[in-house]
C-alpha cells in the first residue's frame, strides 16, 4: 500500500513518492452525468461504450465501379457481364444478382446480395451494352469491399471507460448514433493567488507590486485538464482572511488551489491556514523548480488542497506534476501519469544530484527521425517567457549529476500528443 501525503511529516519526498501520495487525495472519481453529444468534447467516459450497431451497417463499396460475384476459377469467369442496374449510396439494390450479372455502384452503397467484389470504374470497359473487365488477372475476390462491422462490430466495446473524448472519439460516438454519453462530472477547481504585492491585471501597478500571472496560467491549465475554474481572486498575506477564504472555497469546490505563500517567510501564511482549516500533508519535495509545495485536505468535506509555489514557472511545473494527476483521477482517466518520450540532448544540461530538475525545453524530430531537445535558455523559476518558448519539460532524474550533449533524457511534451498512450 502506498503512503498517503499525511504519513511523511517533515521528511523530504522524492518526486515519485509525492506523485503516488497525492493520488490518495482523490481516492475515487467524481460522480457521472448524461451529457449531449454537442457538449462532450474533453469529457471523460464514465462507462465503456458498447456499439449497438455494426459500423459500417452494410457491406458496401469502397470505390465507384461495378459490383459482381467474382468466380473462384478462371474457367468459370465470363468474358463480359450484363449490367443489371445501378445502386447509389443511400439506396439498396433489392434483387440478388444472378450469375453473370453486375451492377454499377458508387462509394458507400450497399453491395447487392450475391456480390462480393468491386472493380473500379477505371478498370472496366463497355462493349455493345455489356461490361468487360480490363485486367481480370489483377482482380482479387473481395477487393474494394468494406465489410459490415469491420470498423466496429455490434456488441464490441467501441470506447473504454476512462477515455477522454477528443475529436476522433466524438466522431466515433456520432457514427454509432449516440446522441449522448455518460461522462464524469468536471472537477470544480477553486483558485486563489496570494500575496500583498500581487495585483490584478487591469489595475494600476503599485510601486512594489507585481501583476498576477499565476491565476491565469493555472486557470488555463485547469481548463486544459478538464476542470471548471472558480476564480476566487487574490488574497492578502493575512492568515485570518486566508482561513475564512479556504474554508469557504472547500464547500463548493472539488479541489482548492493557491499559489504563493507556502515557504517559510514571515508572510507565508498558507500552511498555517491549511493546518487550521484542514489537514496539512507533505510540503517538501526534492524538485526544482517547485519547492516548497503544500498539500492536504480542507474542512469536513476533506476537499483536496494544493498550495503551489508563487514563482510562475514553479507553479506551472508543480501543477503538471502533482495537480494534473489528481484531476485525471477525479475524472476517472485511464492514465494519471504525465506522458513521456526520450530525446537526445543537443547540449550539456545543468542538474543537481538528489532532486529532479525540470528544465524548459524545445524538442524536435531530426531528419533521421530521432527526437532531440535543447534548453530554452535561462531557467529561473520566475522566467515565464521560458514556458512560452518551450514545448516540453526536460525531466532529469534525481540520481543524475549532469546531462552531457548526446545523452538520452526524458521529456514531457506540453501538447496533447500523448492522448490515449499508456503511461
Ligand atoms: P512566495 O512563494 O509567495 O514567496 O512567492 C514567490 C515569488 O513569486 C515572489 O517573487 C512573488 O512575488 C511571486 N508571485 C507570487 N504569486 C504570484 C502571482 N500570482 N503571479 C506572479 N508572481 C507571483
Ligand atoms: Mg507571497
Image: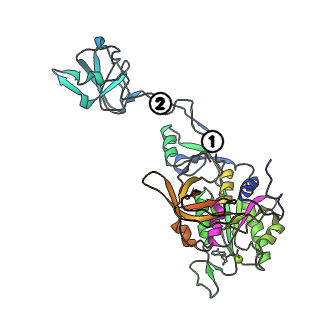
Compare residues 187 and 321 and report the one nearer the observer: 321
Whole-percent x, y for residue 415 in the image? 53, 57
Label at residue 266: none
Quadrant in which residue 385 is drawn: bottom right
Q: Is residue 163 above or below residue 395?
A: above
Q: Which residue sits at x=76%, y=61%? A: 13
Is 310 situated left or right of 417 in this image? right
Q: Which residue sits at x=22%, y=22%? A: 131
Quadrant in which residue 106 is drawn: top left
Is 12 situated left or right of 222 in this image? right
Ligand 1 image position (quadrant): bottom right
Q: Which region shows up in magenta?
A: 299-320
Name the secondary structure under disc 2: loop
Label at residue 161: 1
- Does the stretch in magenta take in 139? no
Report whether residue 253 is seen.
no
Whole-percent x, y for residue 191 in the image? 67, 67
Q: Which residue sits at x=64%, y=44%? A: 46
Q: Is residue 414 above or below residue 94?
A: below
Compare residues 227 and 286 and report the one nearer the observer: 286
Report whether residue 182 is seen.
yes
Whole-percent x, y for residue 262 in the image? 74, 71
Disc count in the image? Answer: 2
Crowding around mark 2 (Cα neighbors within 10 Å: few <14, some 14 to 19, many 20+) is some
- According to the image, label 2 marks what residue? 150
Amino acid at each position: 500500500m502506498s503512503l498517503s501525503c499525511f504519513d511523511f511529516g517533515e521528511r523530504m519526498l522524492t518526486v515519485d513518492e509525492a506523485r503516488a501520495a497525492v493520488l490518495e487525495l482523490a481516492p475515487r472519481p467524481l460522480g457521472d452525468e448524461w451529457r449531449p453529444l454537442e457538449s462532450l468534447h474533453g469529457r471523460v467516459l464514465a462507462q465503456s461504450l458498447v456499439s449497438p450497431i455494426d459500423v459500417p451497417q452494410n457491406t458496401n463499396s469502397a470505390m465507384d465501379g461495378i459490383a459482381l460475384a467474382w468466380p473462384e476459377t478462371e474457367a468459370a469467369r465470363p468474358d463480359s457481364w450484363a449490367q443489371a442496374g445501378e445502386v447509389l449510396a443511400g439506396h439498396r439494390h433489392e434483387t440478388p444478382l444472378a450469375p453473370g450479372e453486375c451492377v454499377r455502384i458508387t462509394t458507400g452503397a450497399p453491395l447487392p446480395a450475391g456480390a462480393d467484389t468491386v472493380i473500379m470504374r477505371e478498370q472496366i470497359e463497355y462493349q455493345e451494352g455489356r461490361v468487360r473487365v480490363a485486367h481480370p488477372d489483377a482482380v482479387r475476390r473481395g477487393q474494394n469491399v468494406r465489410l459490415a462491422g469491420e470498423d466496429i462490430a455490434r456488441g464490441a466495446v467501441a470506447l473504454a471507460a476512462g477515455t477522454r473524448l477528443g475529436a476522433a472519439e466524438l466522431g466515433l460516438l456520432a457514427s454509432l448514433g449516440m446522441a449522448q454519453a455518460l461522462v464524469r462530472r468536471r472537477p470544480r477547481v477553486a483558485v486563489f493567488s496570494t500575496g500583498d504585492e500581487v495585483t490584478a491585471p487591469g489595475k494600476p501597478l503599485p510601486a512594489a507590486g507585481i501583476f498576477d500571472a499565476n491565476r491565469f496560467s493555472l486557470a488555463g491549465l485547469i481548463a486544459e485538464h478538464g476542470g471548471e475554474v472558480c476564480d476566487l481572486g487574490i488574497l492578502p498575506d493575512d492568515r485570518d482572511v486566508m482561513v475564512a477564504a479556504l474554508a469557504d472555497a472547500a464547500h463548493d469546490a472539488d479541489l482548492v488551489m493557491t499559489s504563493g505563500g507556502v515557504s517559510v517567510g514571515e508572510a507565508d501564511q498558507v500552511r498555517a491556514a491549511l493546518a487550521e482549516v484542514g489537514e496539512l500533508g507533505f510540503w517538501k519535495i526534492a524538485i526544482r523548480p517547485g519547492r516548497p509545495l503544500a498539500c492536504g485536505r480542507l474542512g469536513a468535506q476533506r476537499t483536496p488542497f494544493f498550495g503551489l509555489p508563487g514563482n510562475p514557472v514553479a507553479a506551472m511545473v508543480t501543477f503538471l506534476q502533482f495537480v494534473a494527476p489528481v484531476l485525471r483521477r477525479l475524472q476517472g482517466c485511464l492514465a494519471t501519469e504525465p506522458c513521456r518520450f526520450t530525446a537526445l540532448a543537443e547540449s550539456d544540461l545543468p542538474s543537481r544530484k538528489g532532486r529532479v530538475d525540470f528544465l524548459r525545453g524545445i524538442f524536435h524530430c531530426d531528419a533521421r527521425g530521432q527526437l532531440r531537445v535543447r534548453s530554452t535558455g535561462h531557467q529561473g523559476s520566475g522566467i515565464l517567457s521560458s514556458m512560452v518558448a518551450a514545448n516540453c519539460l526536460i525531466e532529469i532524474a534525481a540520481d543524475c549529476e549532469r546531462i552531457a550533449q548526446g545523452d538520452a533524457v526524458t521529456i514531457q511534451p506540453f501538447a496533447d500528443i500523448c492522448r490515449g498512450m499508456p503511461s
